[in-house]
Image (spheres, grey):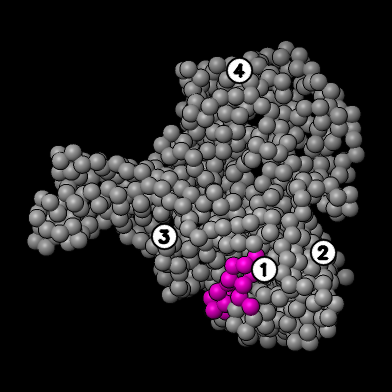
Amino acid sequence: MNIQARSTGPATSTGPANSTGMGAALRQDSALKHCTGEARFADDLPEPPGLLHAALALSPIAHGRLAPLDLAPARAMPGVVAVLGPRDMPGRNDISPSGKAAEVLFADLVVEHWGQPLAMVVARTRDEALAAAAALAPLIEPLPPVLDVAEALEAQSLLMPPMVMARGDWQAALDAAPLPLEGEFRCGGQEHFYLEGQIALAIPGEDGDMTLHSSTQHPTEVQHIAARVLGCDYNRLTVQCRRMGGGFGGKESNASWIAAAAALAAHATGQPVKLRLARKADMAATGKRHPFLFRWRAGCDASGRLLALDATLAADGGHSLDLSGGVLMRAVTHALNACDVPAVRITGLACKTNTVSNTAFRGFGGPQGVLLMEDVLHAAARATGRSVEALREHNFAGGPNGAETPYGQALEGDLIRRVWAEARTLSDWHGRRAEIDAFNASHPTLRRGLGSFVLAFGISFGIVAMNQAGALVHVYTDGSIRLNHGGTEMGQGLFIKVAQVVADVFGVDVGRIRITATSTDEVPNTSPTAASTGSDLNGWAAQIAASTIRTRMAAAAAALWGVPEADITFAEGRVTAGNHAMGFGELAQHCWNQRIGLSATGFYKTPDLHWDPVAMKGHPFFYFSYGASVAEVLVDRLTGEHRVLRADMVQDCGRSLNPAIDRGQIEGAFVQGMGWLTCEELWWDATGRLRTLGPSTYKIPGSRDVPPVFNVRMLEGAPARADTIFRSKAVGEPPLMLATAVWNALRDATGASRLDLPATPERVLAAFR
C-alpha cells in the first residue's frame, strides 16, 4: 500500500506491550499472534475425540412449495451419522432474534430464497458431509419470486408495519415552497466478507450440558436460540468466543443459527460437531446489508434553505424480518443527518423479497439513511445554482437553524460546523477546487471530482434494554488481574481498550491484565458487540468492577498505615500514601490475609435513554459522533473506470482511549464504506440465484484501492460528555459513512443528477452519457 501522506495530529506509533494509561497508543492485544499464526480462531481449536462434521443442504430455487424431503439418499452415503430436517428438533424450528417473527432454521413446506437451508448432514469428515448434502434432491414446486424492492413496494409486500417519523405540517410546507424538488435513487447491499467464515463447534457434556464455541458478536443470542431449538434451559448451554476473524454485523444474528444447527447435531449424535460454512455457502445462506430504494419530494427557497421534505425509504429486508426493524429505525432517524428541515415526514418500509434475509451491517441502517439528504442537497444545488457545500452549511442543524431532530433530540451545531471547518482546511478545499476545475477544462477524456460529507451519528442501541453490560474482575495475590466482560473481539481492539480502562483504575501495566474469552458462564445476559457501543458499555462495566475492588484495597491500605483513604494513590504498579508505599501485589496479598474480597462484578446501563417506537419520539442516543470528509476521484469518461486519489477525514473521538486502535478503525471503516459505494455489487439472476459468490465475482477493495493520499485527523480538544468512559466517543461505525464523500465526488466528476449505488464503472459511464 502506497500511503504518501499520513495522518496529522497525535502520534499513532504503538508503545510497548506493558504501557499503561488511557490514551496510550497500544497495539491490538492479538496483533502479533495474528501475524505469526498463533491466534486461535474457532477452526483452530484442538479437535475433541469423536468430532463429527456437519454440512447444510441448500435450496436450489428462490421460491416454491417444498415436499417432505427424502433423506434416504444422504443417509446411504459413506460416513454419514445423521441427517436432520425440520421435524428433528426437540424444541422449535425458530431462529428469529426476537422469537416473535416467522424465521426457521430449516425450510418447512415453503422455500423462501435461493440458498435457504433445507436439512443438515452429519458425517465423520467434512468432505463426506458435503458429498451427502449434495446427494439430497428436494422436490419443490416453483412459485414466482419477488426479487426487486420496487416490485415488493408496489405489491405492499411488507415484513412489518410502516415506520413514520413526522414533524410540522409537511404537506402545507411542500405546497408553499418556492422551489419544488423531487428525486429517486437506489443503493445496493453489501456482503460482510469477513476473513473467518461462519463456524461453530458444539461439545456435549453430561446431564444435557453443552459448550458452544461460536464465532459470534452475540454469545447470549447464540445461547438463547440454541436453547430454543433444543428445547432446554439457557443454563445448559455455555457459549464462548475468544476472537473472530471479522464480523461487521454479519455475526450478530447469523452466527446464532449456525451455532444452533451445530448444537442440534451434537444433541442428536451425542458427539462433538463442527459446522463451518464454505465461502460460497456462507454468501448464499447468510444476510447482507439492506439495499434501499429512496423516493422523495422536497421544497426550498431561493437561497437553498430546505423548508419541507417527504421521503420514503424502502429497505429490502429479504424473506424474513431478522433485524430489519432496528435497521429501518436507524435509517429513518438519520435521514436528515446533520441538517435541519422544519417540516418533514420520513416513512420507512421493510419490504419482503425472495432473497436471503438481510441483517446487521456496520452502521446498521445509518449509512443508507444519510444518503437521502445528500441527494436532496444535490437537487437543491441544481435548482439554486449554489454549491452542495454551501447548501449543506446553510442547512446545518443549530446556529440560525433548529437544533432538534424530528424525533426530539438535539444535535450540537457547533461541533457539526467545527468538523467541517477542519476537514475543509485539512483538504485545502478551495485551492483544490480551483485546480480540479482547471484540469477538467483542459482534459479531453479524464475528469476529476471533489466531494465532501458531514456526519452526525447517534450512539446507542435503538432498543433501550440492550444498552447494558456486565464485567467480572479478579485480582490475584501476586498482583495479576483477570478480566472478563460481555463484549466480543472481532479485530476492532475492544479487548485492549477495556484492559486499559482496568489498568488505569489499578495503576498497573496493561501487561498485568489477563484478557479472557467472552463466555456466558462468566458474564451472563450480554448485549451484542454492535452499534459502536462496545467500549462505552463494557468499558464502564469493567471500570465499575475494578473500582469496587480498588475501594476495598484502598481501605485496607489506609487501615494498615493509619491514613485517610483519600490519600491512597495507585500508580505505576505501586500503592502509596505520603511516605508509605508498597507494590500492588503486596497489597493484594495483604488484603487476602485480611480476608478482603478481591473479586467483583460490574454492571452498567446507559443513562437518559427513552424511545417511543410508535410515536417515533424520544431520546434514543446517548450522544452523537461527528465527522467530516473530503474525497477526490479521477474518472475515465470512455470506460467509467475510476479511483479515489485522496481522502481527508476529521473524526470526533472525544478523548480517544487508544489513538492507534481508533485510527485503524477510521481508516478501515472508510475503505469498507468506499467498497460498498463503488465496487461491491450483489447480483441475483432472473431466477433469484445469487451469482456474486466469492472473490472471483464479488469485488471488495484491495490495497491498491486505498487512496494514495489518505489523511486522518482526530478532532483535538473536542468537548465530550463527562459520563462517557474517560470522555471517549465511539469510533467503530461512524467513519464508514465518511466514504459518502466518494459518491459526491463521482457526482461532481460526472455532473450526474442521479447515480445509483454501487457506482460501478458501468453506472458511472451511463451517468456521463
Q: The disc labelled 3 sits on which kind of residue?
A: Ile
Mark 3 or mark 1, which is nearer the start of the sequence? 1
Tell whether position 650 is magenta. no
Q: Which residues are magenta?
A: 402-419
Residue for badge 4: 268
> What type of secondary structure mainly makes up the magenta span?
loop
Question: Where residue 267 appears, x then y in whole percent?
Answer: 57, 20
Bin the neighbour count of mark 4 within 10 Å (Cα to Cα): few under 14, some 14-19, many 20 and up.
Answer: some
Q: The disc labelled 4 sits on which kind of residue?
A: Ala
Tell whether position 407 is magenta. yes
Residue for badge 3: 725
Question: Callout 2: helix, strand or loop?
Answer: strand
Label 1 to label 3: alpha-carbon separation: 28 Å
Mark 1 or mark 2, which is nearer the start of the sequence? 2
User: On the picture, is 51 further left or further right than 155?
Assistant: left
Q: Are marks 2 and 1 in contact (CB under 8 Å)?
A: no
Bin the neighbour count of mark 1 within 10 Å (Cα to Cα): few under 14, some 14-19, many 20 and up.
Answer: many
Label 2 to label 4: alpha-carbon separation: 50 Å
Label 4 to label 3: alpha-carbon separation: 45 Å
**Which of the two discs, 1 and 3, sits closer to the camera?**
1
Question: Where residue 687 appears, x then y in whole percent?
Answer: 87, 40
Q: The disc labelled 2 sits on which kind of residue?
A: Arg
Quarter of the image for the C terminus: give it: bottom right
Residue 610 visible in the displayed image: yes
Bin the neighbour count of mark 3 within 10 Å (Cα to Cα): few under 14, some 14-19, many 20 and up.
Answer: many
User: On the picture, is 429 further left or further right than 203?
Assistant: right
User: On the picture, is 307 further left or further right than 254?
Assistant: right
